[in-house]
Amino acid sequence: MSEITRKDVEYVAKLSRIALSREEEEQFVTHLREIVSYVGKLGELDKELVNVSPTLHAWENKGTLLREDELEPSINRQDVFVCAPHHKGEFFTVPKVIE
C-alpha cells in the first residue's frame, strides 16, 4: 500500500465533513501510517502456525452460545398505554419528525 499523505487525510476529512487544523492533519497522518504499518506486519505472519477460527463455528463443539427461544407472556397492552402520552387504537402516536 502507498504511503499515507496529508492529501489523503484532507480527502477523508472532506468526505467526513470535519475540519482539521494543520496540526491535527499531521497527527492523523502519523497515526494512520502507524496503523497501516501494523496491518502490514500482521499480513507477514505465517497463518499456518495460528489455529484460530475467526467465526462463531469455532464454538460448535462447546454447545450453543445462544439461548433457545421461549414463548413467555408479554405485558398487557392496556397497562402499557396507561404510561403512553398518546395512543390511537393499538398503536403509540408520536410527533412527526420527518417532513
Image (tube, grey):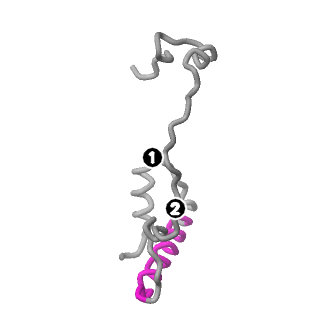
Provide the residue span drawn in magenta. 27-48
Q: Which residue is mark 1?
A: 17
Across and down, in percent, residue 19 comes to: 50, 49
| Marking on residue 62 | none
Which residue is nearer to you in this view: 27 or 21?
Answer: 27
Kind of residue at badge 1: Arg
Across and down, in percent, residue 34 comes to: 52, 75
Q: What residue is rendered at 46% in x and 22% in y?
A: 97
Which residue is nearer to you in this view: 72 or 57?
Answer: 72
Q: What residue is rendered at 47% in x and 15% in y?
A: 90
What secondary structure is marked by label 2? helix
Q: Is residue 28 above or below residue 20?
A: below
Pointer 1 with pointer 2, Cβ within 8 A: no
Across and down, in percent, residue 3 comes to: 40, 75
The quarter holding residue 55 reads bottom left
- Comparing labels 1 and 2, the label whose residue is closer to the camera: 1
Mark 2 crowdedness (10 Å alpha carbons): few <14, some 14-19, many ≥20: some
Q: What residue is rendered at 57% in x and 15% in y?
A: 78
Judged from this view, the residue extending furthest toward the left is 1
Kind of residue at badge 2: Glu
Q: Is residue 88 above or below residue 52?
A: above
Which residue is nearer to you in this view: 12 or 44?
Answer: 44
Q: Quadrant of the C terminus?
A: top left
Most common secondary structure along the magenta stretch: helix
Q: What residue is rendered at 45% in x and 65% in y?
A: 56
Q: Quadrant of the N terminus?
A: bottom left
Q: Is residue 44 above or below residue 83?
A: below
Q: Is residue 29 magenta?
A: yes
Judged from this view, the residue extending furthest toward the right is 83
Q: Which residue is mark 2?
A: 25
Across and down, in percent, residue 70 comes to: 51, 42
